[in-house]
Image: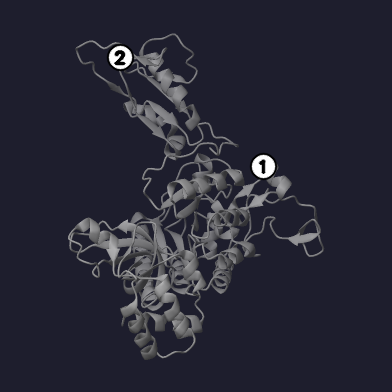
Amino acid sequence: GRYNKHYNPNTKQPKKQNSKKKKQKKIVGVLGCMAERLKENLFKDGLADLVVGPDAYRDLPNLVHKLLLNHYHQDQDTDDIHMDDKNNMTTAVNVQLSLEETYADVTPIRHNPDDVSAFVSVMRGCNNMCSYCVVPFTRGRERSRPLQSIVEEARHLVESENVKEIVLLGQNVNSYHDKSEAAILAKPIISNNKNGCDEINGEERTNTYQTSNEGFKNLYKLRGGAGYYFADLVEAISDISPELRVRFTSPHPKDYPPELLSLMAERPNVCNQLHMPAQSGSSSVLARMRRGYTREAYLELIDDVRRTIPDVAISSDFISGFCDETQQEHHDTLSLMQQVQYDQAYMFAYSMRGKTHAHRKMTDNVPEEIKKQRLQEVIHTFRTNVQRRNEKMEIGRLRLVLVEGESKKSKPGNITFGGRTDQNKRILFPYDNANDMGGHEQQQQHLRLLTDDMVRPLLSQIQNGTSHQDILTDYLRQSQSSEQPSTVSLQPGDYAVVEVTEVRGHTLRGRALWKTSLTSFSEMGLFNVDESALQHSSNLRALLNNI
């Protein structure tokens, strides 16, 4: 921000300006986690005038106003004002963490209102206290927004801003627990039956807190009780519209109870993509990290996930060179990556942060060159595996793609659109089959694509065992007498079925076949991955390539 001498801080109105232009003075502010961590150190050498932590954004107008008042030498309350002896300028700071602030009543302004996807914050803070992580000290304790406020924000995005994908956002998003009065009244805990399941109105229920399996433990003990849990929230958001995709990030592996996995398997619009940050493949490193699980418990969860959601894509985080990491512990991480075969990974060399348990109790004793070497081995392992996995799992598949728009590399005469599959894989598809409409803008919007009404009878005939030649002959006969248009409009926010033809690491390339809807794609059974469904899908792909 900036202020100048034409501003009157008492009336908050511009003063009458002289004809001579006055010099403006900027206010430099640092906001968020970094401000919370470095605090007054940011005032050194005049780096910043204003420092505000992530829970103090509501105080911004007050702090800025006080800076303006001091600039004009007004005699006002200056409890939050600190004098800088070098230049007599003032600085303002509020880095107080809160146990209640969730900004539930603040509607964010979207940076790009044309995006088909939107983030919705559902909770703040973290209680996990992993030994390497500074987040609990910069974001504070976990607190969740009321479920209804989240649903209302998401509904507004869908109905008023044409958003087609909601990403539920939280530092430990799947530990979400709405304990508001309304939530407790809606989801009370009456008693426990002999099986250990909670009861409500005499019926068993499992909405109380559960870890992913018995191998996961909580350092923070005060979990559980009445109210809405994360599975309740995902269900409520997915109920807004069957055409709305639902994702979430960033989770902790301990908070994937069977109820959540079953919901994801049952709901076509809850995406088959999970982030499961392992951090390390060594149980001894995981213990030093205070992650609350072993390698064996994590692998058991991976098996549960893939058994419940067969076509799931799994991503992860990895830290190389944590305190005391041995070569064998590093090899344990590489072997975990080989065993799980991740679809995406975020990989870093360890960097110690102040205030953390590791900073207080451990030594950052793995040499930097060793960290870098191990990190490169982790990256190489991931890249090799993801290429092989995608070649095996994706080539020839028909994927439902939410179209995001023209890709950055698209050029006139070589138009390319991009989007994401249900598994959150980036896919690009060219408009090589576009009609020559005489202009770049028109080529973007018109393709020789089929529609659901054209494809559904073809798939039905395949499922009934009709030969390809008979289907093709019948289709050509009907198309000659049909008045259906040969092109359809395809815009950002539409769903298209794309045949995957090429993989480049974790990015896919393909060919758009027809325009569809999420509901229609599901009803046609194209989400299914059993042998019969995959064969029908393959036969349909082969047939469409001849049309």
Total number of numbered discs in the rendering = 2
Residue 40, horizontal then vertical, whole percent: 43, 29
Residue 499, horizontal then vertical, whole percent: 35, 74
- Location of residue 544 (image quadrant): bottom left
Mark 1 neighbour density, 10 Å: few (under 14) some (14–19) many (20 or more): some
Residue 24 visible in the displayed image: yes
Q: Which residue is mark 2?
A: 5
Vertical relation: 440 (above or below) 97: below
Please tell me which residue is depicted at 56% across the width and 69% down the height of the picture.
305
What distance separates the C-alpha of mark 2 from that of mark 1? 47 Å
Left or right: 545 in relation to 301: left
- Quarter of the image with the C terminus is bottom left
Please tell me which residue is depicted at 54% across the width and 62% down the height of the picture.
284
Whether the residues at callouts 2 and 1 have beta carbons within 8 Å, the answer is no
Please state which amino acid type lies under the numbered disc 1.
Ser
Residue 409 visible in the displayed image: no
Please state which amino acid type lies under the numbered disc 2.
Lys
What secondary structure is marked by label 1?
Answer: loop
Residue 416, horizontal then vertical, whole percent: 26, 63
Q: Which mark is residue 404?
A: none
Q: Which mark is residue 180?
A: 1
What secondary structure is marked by label 2?
Answer: loop
- Quarter of the image with the N terminus is top left
